[in-house]
Amino acid sequence: MAAPAHSSYVCIFVVTLFMFISASSHAVAAVTSAAILVTVDQSGNGDYEKIQDAIDAVPSDNKEVIFILVKAGIYKEKIVVPANKPFITISGSKANGTIITWNESGEIFESPTFTVLASDFVARYLTIQNTFGPGAKAVALRVSGDRAAFFGCRISSYQDTLLDDTGRHYYKSCYIEGAVDFIFGNAASLFENCHLHSLSEGDAAITAQRRQSPSEDTGFTFLGCKITGVRSAVLGRPWGAYSRVVFALTYMSNVILPQGWDDWGDESKQSTVFYREYKCYGPGANVRKRVEWSGKLADNEAQFFLTKNMIGGKSWIRSTPTRFKKASIRHA
């Protein structure tokens, strides 16, 4: 089927995204009414044919919202959003139609398909994957910037899929797949209405959170999520001694082993980790055989984890722009 005319495509796309954001239960505080529109199209009908070229054209210390609209296709690129280029949004129209893929193993900071170092970054409706498979660390997405948000994205690898490194992050309606420690790092992050799919064949952990002292305001909260898998897994293990992970109002299939959590072979961490569950449901949510050093949240304790307050998100998660202006940042 031929692609619609450019103006019609943008109009339909903006309306769709606006409806998606409006459905959120919380008003978004950081409202952006206009953005510079940049298009990426492999067929040559956009401003750029590669995503990285569009990012590279954004001025250093950028202060305007740049909306990079990526047309459907499979983009075999290793992407980096530099720290000096904030306020970038990269968006497809459907996650399964806009695929960013790479195949690389190695150190966690070197292997990612997609690396975000900038603050105030947004990704929408993208598939970000590392296809290396079992046998080594192979990160799909590394997020090391502050105030980053991901909506409707699919993030997949096998070992160490999502390096949720540092900063405050928000993931809404994302699909995240992997086997070993596939959501790991020391960010302060809220995962809302996300689908976590474990490829573990035994007792590998879904999370490996790295909070290293009680003074750090970091941790992962999974709110209203769904957990499925191919065989069996645990919810998490402590990469850092003060690892903090909360699952609230989440469906857990029978993939979750009865013990729920693992201490990574270090009993000393049992007294310092903060692993809690709140009103989760499904066959994997039965807490009767959970390790004694995990626990359930009381209603008053849970309130902090049931909103965006943990990440201060109401002040920085920005809405979809309602007006666009064409870019003037093309390469010569």
Image: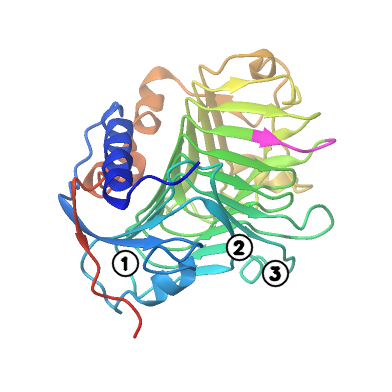
Q: Nearer the viewer, residue 29 or 43?
A: 43
Q: Callout 1: helix, strand or loop?
A: loop
Relative to 219, residue 175 above or below = above
Q: CA distance from mark 3 to mark 2?
A: 12 Å
Q: Nearer the viewer, residue 25 or 299?
A: 25
Residue 293 visible (yes or no): yes
Q: Amino acid at mark 2?
A: Thr
Mark 3, residue position:
107
Q: Amino acid at mark 3?
A: Glu
Mark 1, residue position:
86
2 or 1: tag closer to the N-terminus: 1
Which range of residues does the magenta coloring cover? 197-202
Q: Nearer the viewer, residue 24 or 200?
A: 24
Q: Callout 2: helix, strand or loop?
A: loop
Q: CA distance from mark 2 to mark 1?
A: 19 Å
Decide whether the magenta segment is chiefly helix, strand or loop: loop
Residue 113 numbered tag:
2
Q: CA distance from mark 3 to mark 1?
A: 25 Å
Q: Amino acid at mark 1?
A: Pro
Taking the magenta stretch, the answer to whether it contains residue 85 is no
Residue 82 visible (yes or no): no
Quarter of the view holding residue 114: bottom right
Q: Position of residue 124 (x, y in %)?
A: 42, 47
Q: Nearer the viewer, residue 49 or 212?
A: 49
3 or 1: tag closer to the N-terminus: 1
